[in-house]
Amino acid sequence: MTDLEGALRNVVRGDVGFDVTSRALTTMDASNYRRVPLGVVAPHDAEDVAAVLEVCRDHMVPVVARGGGTSIAGQATGTGIVLDFTRHMNRLVSLDPETRTAVVQPGVVLDRLQDAAAPHGLRFGPDPSTHSRCTLGGMIGNNSCGSHSVAWGTTADSVRELSVLTARGERLRLGQGWSGAPEGLRALADGELARLRTGFPDLPRRISGYALDALLPEKGADVARSFCGSEGTLGVLTEAVVRLVEAPRARALAVLAYADESAAAEAAAGLLPYGPLTVEGMAADLVPSAAVLPRGGAWLFVETGGSDAAEARARAEAIVRAADVVDALVMTDPAGQRALWRIREDASGTATRMPDGSEAWPGWEDCAVPPERLGAYLRDFRGLLNAHGLRGTPYGHFGDGCIHVRIDFDLLSDAGIGRFRRFSEELAEVVVAHGGSLSGEHGDGQARAELLPRMYGEEMVGLFERAKGVWDPDDLLNPGMLVRPAALDANLRFSVLPRKPVDVVFGYPSDGGDFSAAVRRCVGVAKCRTTSASGPSVMCPSFRATGEEQHSTRGRARLLHEMLAGELVTDGWRSKEVRDALDLCLSCKGCRSDCPVEVDMATYKAEFLHHHYAGRRRPAAHYSMGWLPVWLRAVARTRTARLVNALASVRPLARVAKRLGGIAPEREIPRVATETFSRWWGRRVEERAGRILRPVREGDASFGDGLHTVALLWPDTFTEHLSPTVGQAAVRVLEAAGISAVLPPTRAMAGRRGRVCCGLTYVSTGQLDRARRVLGRTLDLLEPLLDRPVPVIVLEPSCAAALRSDAPELLPDDPRARRLADRVLTFAEALEQLAPDWTPPRVDRPVVGQTHCHQHAVLGDAADRRLRQSAGLDGELSGGCCGLAGNFGFEKGHFGVSVACAEEQLVPAVREAGEGAVVLADGFSCRTQLGEVAGVRGRHVAQVLAEGLGGGGS
């Protein structure tokens, strides 16, 4: 233990982490920069903060305050001690509706404050797009703004008092009238009144530099306001009193369409006199093709408020009439508004990939100019991009003259880094020429502080340095930010990554086959750190269960980044730190769809496990559950299902089996079906199937019996051996719809033996060589059918996802894998596409349950929603993950997290369902979890529809 670590542990009641994992998780924020800290402290209270500052002062070690770690300019990273306020100092201390104020600790997430204020008709005005995970301390440090700043201003406009500790241990209560000012600050300001009155540009989004003009007597000598935006360089915030505003009772959203980005920018300032709540802009290349927006090349999102929906709509329609638009849409439905806003909020991640898939980065993320100059500035900005051969898509707060943009800088080569510097220097001149601020929201950090003299001049920057000296004479608080800054092209987080592609198994087609590029996808926007799943979202269930950064998608990506870097995590694929962080990853694939940059941690986990255990003994669960298809086929072949079930029902024997198999002792061993689905199907339809398949075997190019649509019904392991009633119900429904279901052949035309398998259990346990062999054999068996347009219906969502995504990525050089993937249909998709004129039976019952996480992430559920609607199955299924997630919830040590995931959304929804509600769960894992945790029976939608046909469905 180092002297510093020991000294901190002796005086801090909170958490002290000098281990590799703690440090690796905080090497980066959401910027281009990386610094390795000595250690991380999560203080319990202000006394802990004071103790940390005293120890660090004695050791002359710098201190960096960190909230959600979503800063885009590098100011949440450091080489000394990082203070993590999100673990313990994260409380809403009080809320007073009468005075419209709240007292908060620095680590409280903005959405928690909004949730507490909402019942009183109040809210905190500023709301960055990261509102679900950014903290009030970070917002004060950066003077954050958000989309509603045209109505409610910046964070500084909402701050009343701040409790601050200086690096030398002085406790200050900052406010107006010089309240809490450190000694020497007033004298400094009084001696520079002329400069303070004339040296700052007048615009709503001037975030760059220190807000020393807030100390002017005509502005109330507001020390608290001047502290906002200081990026942790002046003092450490321990508590804040903030102002709340009255929230409109109703809102409407006008989406105004323009021909292009410049037209939208030119129009934005003209809408401000109408008193909108937002004027946000974005162009077509940031909008998903499926987005329902009025026709145009760029849009303004203009929100209005009112005492009721009619008043809000009337104000929105007035703006539409006043605006010169190509087309427009006014949305008053709250769900519809949320869907539209989600497009805008995800832009910070979406923008990190260009339309062709190439990478784009922050660095010049949020310059701001006077709103009336925005159109001209954007033209100059575009011209500069073209001159440097760069690309970027501006979006953001057009009503405030502030744009966000990610640019396709090459930050991996010396030439590219040189161009990054030259562009930054020239763009700073363009911003200043338009009367703007280098930062309009996210702060200067390392990205822009070096260029502050171009905006303010050397004398004003010298005044900033003198102010820093008053507050922090020892330069211990976040050194290298704002004053005496590090170079904007130093400490780049990419410089430590390998320059040659890493040898991997998956193809990573969206990343050019480069695992490093796949890991670089995570830019730190931290949507995975959201503490509650909203709507249908899934990501990231393990983080919501534990609250630990290492169990978030971002945390795991950070550890993989450090593993590739080899500086902090030094044992590569053998790393225990990476293994332990990935251990609680459910492989739900939620991040593949919910992460704005589509990080696929389930794939990265499988890749890591493959290398980590190469040539070594694996955990018992990898053999017991990873090889589940083999064991279940052996039971079926020997017809010993009844014996296996009987032995499993003897508790002492079951305990031994679970211990040997690495299975959680709390789990029940699933019962094996005494008759497999294939045997049932063979008894019922073998003769007909023979007639249908005979032309194929004889080399006929046709397929089918001429009377029905024919499709292969995939006998996945779970349907085949554990819940064949699902397959039986599916056959009944498919036949009722005019679809003849046949099973794949069990031997290839060349005489090879075997059964088809998607390889899911091998993939999820990282046995990728085995998965490739299994998939290769499957493709051999199916090869005669893959040249024909034969649809493949897969009832188990996780198996369908494996065939659609994992198979072609594991076998990128085998075109048969892609052909098979393109033929895969879910049950609902099959009914919709193969029997479009068929009407399902009317069940007319409410439904409850959960969309399977793999269905949500890989397959989509639009067809399922339409099927349920047609059948009269009313109600929305919840988001999140059931927590069982295949082998995850069965593995020893995972039971607690597994149940916590289920208890988040699924189980409460089922418990609150009324009498007669149908519990839908298409996945075997989901049905098993519901039975064990909630004591209810979930059913596949095929079973429900089969029951509706009459004669029972299960």
Image (cartoon, helix red, strand yellow):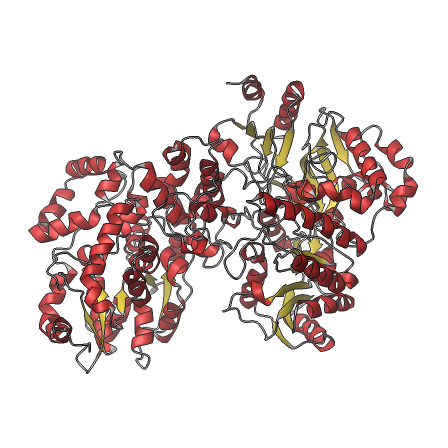
Q: In the shown orientation, is residue 518 left or right of residue 465?
A: left
Q: Position of residue 559 (x, y in %)?
A: 46, 38
Q: Can residue 484 be seen in this snapshot?
A: yes
Between 117 and 495, the one lying in front of the other is 495
State the residue at coordinates (38%, 42%). 897
Residue reaching furthest to the front? 415
Q: In the shown orientation, is residue 560 left or right of residue 203?
A: left
Quarter of the image holding residue 804? bottom left
**400 to 605, vertically: above or below:** below
Q: Position of residue 876 (x, y in %)?
A: 42, 64
Residue reaching furthest to the top? 3
Q: In the shown orientation, is residue 780 left or right of residue 387?
A: left
Between 66 and 522, the one lying in front of the other is 522
Residue reaching furthest to the left? 638
Q: Position of residue 868 (x, y in %)?
A: 36, 70
**296 to 814, vertically: above or below:** below
Quarter of the image holding residue 616? top left
Q: Can residue 914 be seen in this snapshot?
A: no
